[in-house]
Each structure stands twice: as C-alpha cells, then as structure tokens.
C-alpha cells in the first residue's frame, strides 16, 4: 500500500470535518453560547458554601508520652520516635471518617443545642451527607493534619468542624482508656498469682504506673491534637462560574459538531 493511500481516510475525515465547520459554524457558536449560558445560570443558582479550615499537630503531652515509651524499646530497634508520632496523628485522621465517631456528633449537647434539626435526622443519612463535605490530609512532612468542612452557613461549618474534632478526641481517649483498663486487669491477675518477691515487686511497679496513666487518660490529660492555627472561614461559590461556563460551552459545541457531521454526511 502506498503512503498516500494510507493517509486517504484521514484526509477524507479531516475534509469532512472542515466542510461541516464551514457550513455549520454559526450553529456551533449558538450551541456553545447556549451551553455556556446554561452552565453559568446553573452555578449562580447554587447556594455558596462556607469552608471551615484548621490545621492540627500532635499534642505535646502525647509527644512526651510517646518519648517515654520509646525509651523502653530494646536497643537496636530500627523504629524512630518520629515514626511513632506520625502514626499517632495518622490514627486521629482515620477516626475522622469513622461512622461511630460521627455518631458522637449527633449526641453532642453543645452542637445539638444550636442545630437540633441536624441531630434529629437519621444517623446514617447524616453521615453520608456530611462525610461528602469533609476533606482532610495528613502531611507527614511536619506531621500536620489539615481538616476542612463545607456547609451552607459559616457558623454551621465552624460548629461542625469543632464537633468533629471533639468526637474524634473522645473516641481516641476511649480507646486509650479501654487498653489501659485491660492492661491493669491483666497485671492485677498476674500479681495475685505471682509467687516470688521479685516478680511481685516488678508487677506492682508496672501496675502502679498503668493505674497512674489510666487516671491521666480519664482526666483528659492526653489530648491527641493541638490546633496549630485557629479555624479559618472562607465563603466561596459551590463551583467556579467561568470554568463551568467555558466547559459547558465547549461540550455543547462538540456535541453540536458531531450531530452536524452525522446529518451532513447523510
């Protein structure tokens, strides 16, 4: 096959498209303008959203506690203290998307006092709706957790963000209390069964330490996060008007050109 024959179908298709553009360019412009106008109208009809943003880092009390635990790790272990801190804040980030954590928001007296209608809505529906409005990112460099929530009103966005952080910290605290309670129970059983003085002495020292930590956890001394920056409220449109209008115009022109190509070819 000759080279000229290979390019013949492409040349015919290109010629056909150019022919369609010459004959239907005015209709294409009308279709593009109509699509852009409809896109702009759609965006302007959407209610603007307020965004509550905040940045969090690991609390100093948790860092100090992790440092104490790190000192007890056997020498030669490749695990670094920084890795422990990153993993700890990552656990907080994972809590932000757990349904049981969001369930605590609908039971939050402070939040429900101002937004009773939201708290009375079915929990699963609430979670699905508001989970879509949440965005968070854990940046390991600097170990920062960026969280933001969108809502129709600035006050609601700020209240929802604060309630979510309180719920995550409450669940985090609950996990710590449960673990320490189990450890205390095991140590008490082991202490009761111990037969030597040295064993009882070591178990008693560990038991006192765990009971002291349990008391601090119950008192809320080990809050996991510290707000690096206060909440920032940003009111912004749901979508960018210019972007949507241009995209809708180009899409309308493309669809109109395809229809014109089919009609003229027939």
Image: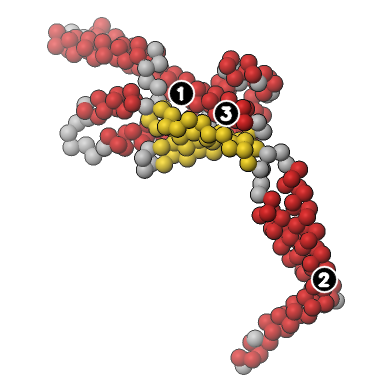
Cα separation, mark 2 vs mark 1, equals 61 Å
The residue under label 3 is 158
Q: Is residue 21 left or right of residue 89?
A: right
At 29% from the left and 24% from the top, the residue drawn is: 65
Q: Nearer the viewer, mark 2 or mark 1?
A: 2
Residue 145 in the image, given as x and y percentages of width and height: 44, 36
The residue under label 1 is 169
Q: Earlier in the sequence, mark 2 or mark 1?
A: 2
Tags 3 and 1 touching, CB below 8 Å? no
Q: Is residue 237 left or right of residue 98?
A: right
Q: Quadrant of the N terminus?
A: bottom right
Residue 195 in the image, given as x and y percentages of width and height: 18, 8
Q: Nearer the viewer, mark 3 or mark 1?
A: 3
Determine whether the residue tagged by mark 1 lies in a helix, strand or loop.
helix
Q: Which sits in the foreground, 241 or 194?
A: 241
At 41% from the left and 35% from the top, the residue drawn is: 90
Asked where in the image residue 21 lies, by quadrant, the reply is bottom right
Q: Quadrant of the C terminus?
A: bottom right
Cα separation, mark 3 vs mark 1, equals 17 Å
């Amino acid at each position: 096959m000759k080279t000229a024959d290979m390019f013949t179908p492409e040349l015919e298709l290109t010629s056909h498209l150019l022919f369609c553009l010459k004959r239907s360019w005015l209709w294409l412009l009308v279709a593009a303008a109509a699509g852009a106008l409809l896109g702009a109208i759609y965006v302007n009809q959407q209610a603007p959203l307020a965004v509550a943003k905040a940045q969090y880092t690991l609390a100093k009390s948790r860092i100090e506690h992790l440092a104490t635990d790190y000192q007890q790790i056997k020498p030669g272990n490749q695990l670094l203290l920084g890795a422990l801190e990153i993993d700890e804040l990552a656990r907080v980030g994972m809590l932000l998307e757990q349904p049981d954590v969001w369930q605590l928001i609908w039971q939050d007296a402070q939040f429900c006092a101002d937004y009773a209608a939201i708290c009375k809505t079915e929990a699963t529906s609430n979670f699905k709706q508001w989970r879509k409005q949440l965005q968070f990112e854990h940046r390991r460099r600097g170990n920062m957790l960026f969280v933001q929530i969108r809502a129709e009103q600035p006050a609601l966005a700020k209240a929802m963000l604060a309630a979510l952080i309180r719920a995550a910290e409450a669940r985090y605290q609950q996990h710590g209390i449960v673990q320490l309670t189990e450890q205390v129970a095991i140590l008490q059983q082991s202490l009761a069964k111990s037969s030597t003085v040295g064993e009882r002495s070591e178990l008693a020292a560990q038991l006192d330490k765990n009971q002291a930590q349990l008391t601090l956890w119950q008192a809320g001394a080990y809050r996991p996060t510290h707000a690096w920056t206060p909440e920032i409220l940003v009111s912004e449109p749901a979508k960018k008007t210019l972007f949507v209008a241009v995209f809708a115009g180009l899409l309308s022109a493309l669809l109109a050109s395809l229809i014109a190509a089919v009609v003229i070819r027939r």
